Image (cartoon, rainbow, N blue to C red):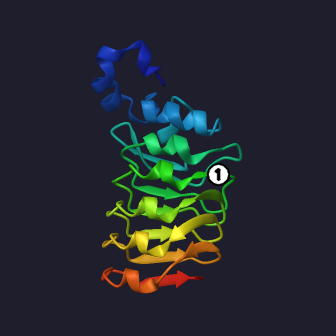
């Protein structure tokens, strides 16, 4: 049974506990606007989406009709965003308030923007923007102290001194074409 949450605002907590995967949370409604293939009432039941307490925490892959990533910037509980080879576009700056994000993989997508805007996402431990049109100084990522993997292969617009990353002591794997 899937219930449009807007019709029963007083029962929100109960519905989240009892119905779980079929609640039309705000996150599911946002995802449906971004990718019409995602159900607005059951997005957490999708094989591409993980949720916790009605909030989207992970997106791995998308349907063929997904679009601008700007909508994803409103998913405050998002921890994992893996859209490799997806038909998505937009400015990565729209993700700059996703402070819970630990894994961001947008390689081989149509995303653009300055990598420095991600510099305060200090929970990131995996970042791959390879084969994208992102730009900016690699030094803008110097505050990502949890980062273990950084890949920006074939991101021709990224430049700067790799020495700016020397403070990233957790970094174990790096792949750059500067």
Tell me which corner region of the image, top left, top right, bottom left or bottom right, holds residue 85.
Answer: bottom right
Which residue is at 44% across, 59% downward?
117
Which residue is at 42% across, 52% downward?
96
Q: Secondary structure at mark 1?
A: strand
Up-down: is 142 above or below 95?
below
Q: How many marks?
A: 1
Describe residue 89's horizontal placement relative to residue 161 as left or right: right
Q: Please tell me how crowded label 1 is: few (under 14), some (14-19), or many (20+) other residues with Cα within 10 Å.
A: some
Q: Nearer the viewer, residue 89 or 56?
A: 89
Residue 97 visible from this viewpoint: yes
Circle 1 residue: 89
Residue 155 visible from this viewpoint: no
Up-down: is 34 above or below 133?
above
- x, y percentage for residue 169? 30, 83
Which residue is at 50% across, 64% downward?
115
- x, y percentage for residue 30? 51, 34
Q: Quadrant of the C terminus?
A: bottom right
- x, y percentage for residue 31? 54, 38
Describe residue 170's horizontal placement relative to residue 64 as left or right: left
Which residue is at 59% across, 38% downward?
34
- x, y percentage for residue 10? 29, 15
Describe residue 58's horizontal placement relative to residue 32 as left or right: left
Up-down: is 5 above or below 71?
above
Describe residue 113's horizontal placement relative to residue 148 as left or right: right
Q: Nearer the viewer, residue 58 or 158?
A: 158
């Amino acid at each position: 049974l899937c219930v449009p949450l807007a019709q029963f605002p007083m029962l929100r907590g109960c519905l989240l506990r009892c119905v779980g995967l079929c609640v039309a949370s705000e996150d599911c409604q946002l995802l449906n606007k971004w990718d019409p293939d995602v159900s607005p009432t059951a997005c957490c039941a999708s094989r591409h989406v993980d949720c916790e307490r009605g909030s989207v925490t992970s997106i791995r892959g998308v349907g063929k009709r997904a679009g601008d990533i700007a909508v994803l910037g409103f998913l405050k509980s998002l921890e994992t965003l893996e859209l490799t080879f997806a038909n998505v576009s937009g400015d990565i700056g729209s993700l700059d308030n996703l402070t819970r994000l630990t894994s961001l993989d947008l390689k081989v997508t149509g995303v653009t923007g300055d990598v420095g805007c991600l510099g305060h996402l200090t929970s990131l431990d995996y970042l791959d923007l390879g084969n994208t049109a992102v730009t900016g100084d690699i030094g803008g990522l110097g505050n990502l102290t949890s980062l273990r993997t950084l890949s920006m292969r074939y991101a021709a617009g990224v430049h700067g001194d790799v020495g700016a990353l020397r403070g990233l002591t957790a970094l174990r794997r790096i792949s750059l074409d500067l």
